[in-house]
Amino acid sequence: MPQSFKLAVIPGDGIGPEVVAEAVKVLDAVTEGTDLTFEKTHFSLGAGRFLETGDVLTDGDLAAIEQHDAILLGAVGGVPGDPRLANANIERGLLLRLRFSLDHYVNLRPTRLFPGIASPLADPGEVDFVVVREGTEGPYVGNGGAIRVGTPHEVANEVSVNTAFGVERVVRYAFGQAESRRGRLTLVHKTNVLTFAGSLWKRTVDAVAAEHPSVVVDYLHVDAATIFLVTNPARFDVIVTDNLFGDILTDLAAAISGGIGLAASGNINPEGDFPSMFEPVHGSAPDIAGQQKADPTAAILSVALLLRHLGAADAADRVDRAVIADLAARGPSHRTTAEIGDTIAALLTQN
Ligand SMILES: NC(=O)C1=CN([C@@H]2O[C@H](COP(=O)(O)OP(=O)(O)OC[C@H]3O[C@@H](n4cnc5c(N)ncnc54)[C@H](O)[C@@H]3O)[C@@H](O)[C@H]2O)C=CC1
Ligand SMILES: CC(C)CC(=O)C(=O)O
Ligand SMILES: [Mg+2]
């Protein structure tokens, strides 16, 4: 049956447009000659747009984006420290506003060490886990403030918000993931010092665990989790954690599994009340922007997550297989961003 989807494309800043161009190239290649079609609308948003117009994300932008079935985003954010962006807060005003407004409470970040990819770990073992990061709460909600700013007596607060509703729904999603994978779930937090939030997360996991007797549950403090991610990543199947810890752990997860250029993610609203958004884990990488040095694989694997989310599992599998074939054949030679996209797109037309 023909399937037609409306896709909002937000290339963003820095390497965002470079990697999104390749992701779109691969999406076009995988859908070519099939009943699957994507009607794409490009949204020019990010630091560049702010510098041109003074707008970060207007209510009109948000309303227009909401009309789509899914969102593909590159990365947003200017050069850290750029004084022209001092008051813009692109990350919060754009990326986090999208995640919060579209209720992306699951930030799904799969980590796999693909065949042929070197890990910096001497003996990584089987690396295949997903981080289920809470996406709408925690310390990122902007619940803070500062007084006596710029004086020696400045006090700055950034309060982590954790609600029973918000924690339970993401924990339930994580148990579902564990049941469909290898049946192991690790809660990562810092319950020994963040006792109020930690207690809520721990009690919620214990309560939901009682409904999922087939899932083996354990707990790690976040500092210890960083040790095991390096010494024994094979111990992990599903990690469930809060917004901040999940952000940090997933850069580490990317590093042990071949690098940030391979790490994909989905900002998911599981109920489908709002469009979900798919993006690489990395940022706008100003240090390599405009040089065709960025690896677009993370953005391309994000397209696979997008397709799977929309129910196009065959197309998602084809993208995954093409990426795996490209990774397996990668040698030491450096290819441009576009060359990697071209290779993966060409592999798709062969299978
Ligand atoms: N989702 C988003 O849009 C995110 C935005 N940011 C923003 O991006 C800007 C830069 O942040 P950073 O902390 O430097 O993180 P980053 O992820 O942009 O870069 C960290 C390092 O990884 C490298 N890197 C990133 N993506 C790569 C790719 N695809 N291929 C090869 N190398 C890659 C960069 O060159 C850099 O050395 C900031 O404005 C930050 O706020 C940061 C993280 C996520
Ligand atoms: C603006 C940040 C929350 C983006 C980021 O680093 C991430 O989502 O991994
Ligand atoms: Mg991050």
Image: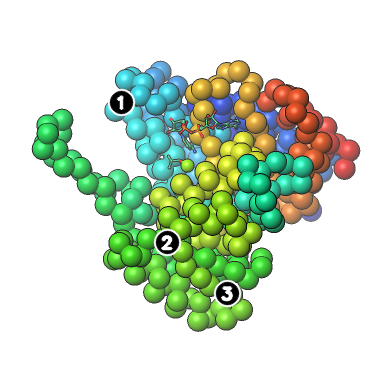
Question: Between tags 1 and 2, which lies in front?
Answer: 2
Quadrant in which residue 130 is drawn: bottom right
Q: Nearer the viewer, residue 205 or 193?
A: 193
What is the distance, in whole Å, between disc 1 and disc 2 at their CAs?
34 Å
Q: Residue furthest right?
A: 350
Vertical placement of 311 versus 91: above or below? below
Packing grade of label 2 (10 A; few <14, some 14-19, many >=20) is some
Q: Amino acid at mark 2?
A: His
Quarter of the C terminus within the rendering: top right
State ligand 2's quadrant. Answer: top left
Residue 221 bears which disc, if any? Answer: 2
**Would residue 138 be found to the left or right of residue 329 on screen?**
left
Element carrying mark 2: strand
Which residue is pictured at 70% across the width and 41% down the height?
A: 118
Question: Between tags 1 and 3, which lies in front?
Answer: 3
Q: Earlier in the sequence, mark 3 or mark 2?
A: 3
Which residue is pictured at 65% across the width and 28% down the height?
A: 21
What is the distance, in whole Å, between disc 1 and disc 3 at their CAs?
46 Å
User: Where in the figure is residue 278, as x and y percent of width and height?
Assistant: 58, 44
Question: By what rule are the colours in the image chosen?
Answer: rainbow
Q: Nearer the viewer, residue 228 or 208?
A: 228
User: Where in the figure is residue 246, as x and y percent of width and height?
Assistant: 47, 52
**Residue 194 visible at all:** yes
Vertical placement of 218 versus 303: above or below? below
What is the distance, in whole Å, between disc 3 and disc 2 at their CAs?
17 Å
Q: Amino acid at mark 3?
A: Val
Q: Amino acid at mark 1?
A: Ala
User: Is the residue at mark 1 in contact range of ligand 1, meaning its CB lies under 8 Å from it?
Assistant: no
Element carrying mark 3: strand
Vertical placement of 227 versus 186: above or below? above
User: Which residue is identified by label 1?
Assistant: 86
